[in-house]
């Protein structure tokens, strides 16, 4: 089959993916650009420019290399009826769980405060709580949310999770479902870890109403999408002390503009969208497995629901 590779990236990144994908599926032909009269059976994409998949009548699969598909789903030029598969990579899930653990542990033990004290040459020991005295709420129970919740539980934290809709139970994990349950759970939470997909229902979820339900000094860890957060509301909550600290990996505009207050706010720790990077060594094999399933007529993995948006 002919496979089209298309995305928004630098040439070096594209070439690295092309090499990894070609090695993972040598029986198929990978194209970096369209060729006249050449049928394309599948497209492997990384935030493709709008319109780049138009006019491909033989297209039978759009395989994303990224876990988040909100930008892809927002592209109204995509051919109708072609299934979209997102990247679900155990290596990425593990990396995200590591970042969630680092953030929660750093908040719990005051390590961000110690870093600030070092800048001021201040020698001051902070009170130390046990992990089981810290209530953590993980928003989202997809692959990454589940991995993060499990890793935090293993470290001894008191962990609960929230998802928008009812679903199967998670052994050993308290799961809240629906907006009323979220509002009821927030007053007891010290750390919120957001790993929700971005949908119309979750956009701007982390806003003034959400923050007002938290206890004074609670922390926010946003590892999902920048559009989940209302920036002005978070900054107001940080200024008032309602939110004690925020660990932010994702932003409305990336790279984060140099004039943005997050850069200089003492209550914010920034990451440059690096909490869990796609590892092409494992992701190329996962994408190739779905391409091979398409060629063999087998069921495709990790298909996106147009109704749910992820």
Image: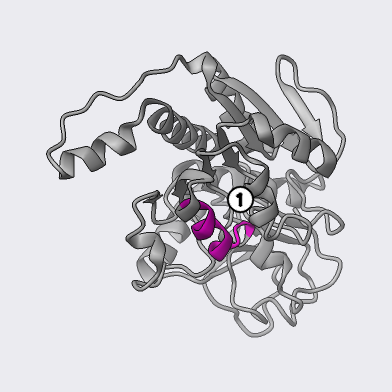
Question: What element does badge 1 sit on?
Answer: loop
227 to 130, vertically: above or below: below
Question: Which residues lie in the magenta part?
Answer: 228-238
Q: Is residue 169 visible?
A: yes
Residue found at x 55% / y 39%: 216
Q: Is residue 124 magenta?
A: no
Magenta region, main secondary structure = helix
Residue extending furthest left?
121
Q: Position of residue 14 (x, y in %)?
A: 44, 65
Residue found at x 56% / y 50%: 25
Q: Position of residue 101 (x, y in %)?
A: 46, 30
Q: Nearer the viewer, residue 104 or 60?
A: 104
Q: Nearer the viewer, residue 243 or 137?
A: 243
Residue under numbered circle 1: 67
Residue found at x 47% / y 49%: 23
Q: Position of residue 122 (x, y in %)?
A: 16, 35
Q: Position of residue 210 (x, y in %)?
A: 68, 49
130 to 219, vertically: above or below: above
Please indicate whether residue 178 sits to the left or right of residue 196 in the image: right
């Amino acid at each position: 089959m002919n496979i089209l590779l298309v995305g928004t990236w630098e040439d070096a990144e594209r070439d690295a993916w092309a090499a990894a994908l070609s090695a993972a599926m040598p029986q198929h032909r990978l194209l970096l650009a369209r060729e006249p009269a050449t049928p394309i059976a599948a497209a492997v994409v990384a935030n493709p420019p709008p319109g780049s998949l138009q006019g491909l009548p033989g297209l039978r699969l759009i395989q994303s290399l990224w876990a988040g598909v909100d930008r892809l789903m927002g592209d109204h030029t995509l051919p109708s009826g072609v299934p979209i598969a997102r990247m679900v990579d155990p290596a990425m899930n593990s990396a995200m769980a590591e970042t969630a653990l680092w953030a929660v542990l750093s908040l719990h033990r005051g390590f961000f405060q110690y870093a600030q004290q070092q800048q001021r040459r201040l020698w001051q020991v902070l009170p130390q709580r046990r992990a089981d005295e810290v209530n953590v709420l993980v928003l989202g129970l997809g692959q990454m949310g589940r991995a993060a919740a499990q890793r935090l539980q293993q470290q001894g934290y008191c962990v609960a999770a929230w998802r928008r809709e009812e679903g199967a139970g998670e052994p050993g994990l308290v799961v809240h479902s629906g907006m009323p349950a979220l509002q009821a759970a927030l007053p007891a939470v010290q750390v919120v870890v957001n790993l929700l997909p971005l949908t119309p229902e979750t956009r701007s979820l982390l806003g003034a109403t959400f923050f007002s339900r938290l206890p004074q000094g609670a922390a926010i860890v946003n590892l999902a999408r920048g559009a989940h957060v209302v920036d002005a509301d978070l900054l107001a909550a940080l200024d008032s002390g309602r939110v004690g600290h925020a660990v932010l990996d994702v932003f409305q505009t990336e790279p984060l503009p140099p004039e943005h207050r997050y850069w200089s706010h003492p209550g914010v720790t920034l990451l440059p969208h690096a909490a869990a990077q796609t590892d092409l060594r494992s992701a190329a094999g996962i994408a190739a497995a779905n391409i091979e399933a398409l060629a063999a007529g087998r069921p495709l993995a990790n298909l996106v629901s147009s109704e749910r948006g992820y």
